[in-house]
Amino acid sequence: MALTSTPFLSYHEIQVDNIDIYEDAFGFYQEFSEVIKLLEQLKPVPKKRLTKRLIERVRQMN
Amino acid sequence: MKKTMSDYELIEQFVKGEQSCFEELIRRHKNKVFAYISLYIRDQALAEDLFQDTFLKVIQSVKCGKYYDNGKFISWVMRIAHNLIIDHFRRVKQLNTVSNDDYESDLFNSKKLAEDNIEDHLIKRQIQKDIRKLISQLPDDQREVVILRHYSGLSFKEIADITDVSINTALGRMRYALINMRKMMEEAKISLTYN
């Protein structure tokens, strides 16, 4: 029987950023990993000109 | 310096007259706000207007002293965006007739894009189009939870607060949304393996 060992992680090495405890408890990532991976491929960002125009409008307000 | 300041510190400095502090807040949170609005509103021009209106409304509210820090500035901003979207739908009442055909956005990081070949680019573009279509076909309440969680990065507690439902309801909506999207992916034979 092949044995695999799990490396020991210290408390500070455990990554908890962006972990939602409710989501974690519901196991969405385990159950729907392929759907979530697909969702992660979309990253909508505003066009540069839109951000620039917004900042100009903010400056005009003051 | 500004990049290390908290949201609340930036707001405080902005209220005192430091204009550039609000610009830092915009740069910090623009993607989350834009993702929420642009995935919820199918008309690109309208989404851009609401994106700007959200931040202008934030300024008005901050100047009127309506923001009290509880460490959740982005949740508050998202609630404002949410309310502006609801107001819009109340005014127009034509949610299902808005076209998404001419949607164009800077979906790709340009440096990354330059490294990809044309074929990769076209495949990626098609997949992103498919994802948008999947999201747009979800019922409104499920779509909102998916967008707020996966594209705006809010916790389920924050999503429940913004949408005025319990955390369990928000979680239930997410579960139904994921089940529905899986079903649609199977029906549409959308590739899951693109990297």
Image (spheres, coloured by chain):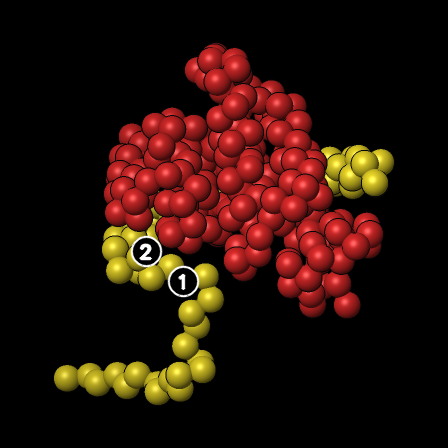
Chain colours: A yellow, B red
**Three-letter residue code for mark 1:** Ile
Answer few, some or many: residues within 10 Å of disc 1's Cα (few below 14, many 20 plus, some between 14 and 19): few
Is B135 situated above or below A9? above
Residue under label 1, please give it. Answer: A19
Residue B194 is situated, as x and y percent measured from the top left of the image, at: 45, 47
User: Residue at left 25%, top 55%?
Assistant: A26
Q: Amino acid at mark 2?
A: Glu
Q: Position of residue B93 (x, y in %)?
A: 47, 13
Q: Position of residue B9 (x, y in %)?
A: 68, 62
Task: Compare residues B40 and B10 and report the one nearer the observer.
Answer: B10
Judge if badges 1 and 2 mark residues of a common chain.
yes
Q: Is residue B96 above or below residue B9?
A: above
Specify the quadrant of the image occupied by residue B169.
top left
Above or below A13: residue B79 = above
State the SS at label 1: loop
Apparent side of residue B14 relative to residue B55 in the rendered image (left or right): right
Residue under the point 62% across and 23% down: B46
The picture places residue B187, in percent across and down from the top left corner, at 29, 30
Chain ID of residue with mark 1: A
The answer to whether mark 1 and mark 2 are in CB contact below 8 A is yes
Q: Which residue is mark 2?
A: A23
B54 left or right of B141 in image: right
Q: Residue at x 40, y 83 (%)?
A: A11
Could you tell me which quadrant the N terminus of chain B lies in?
Answer: bottom right
- Relative to B99, B179 lies left or right: left
Residue lying at the far left of the rendered structure:
A1
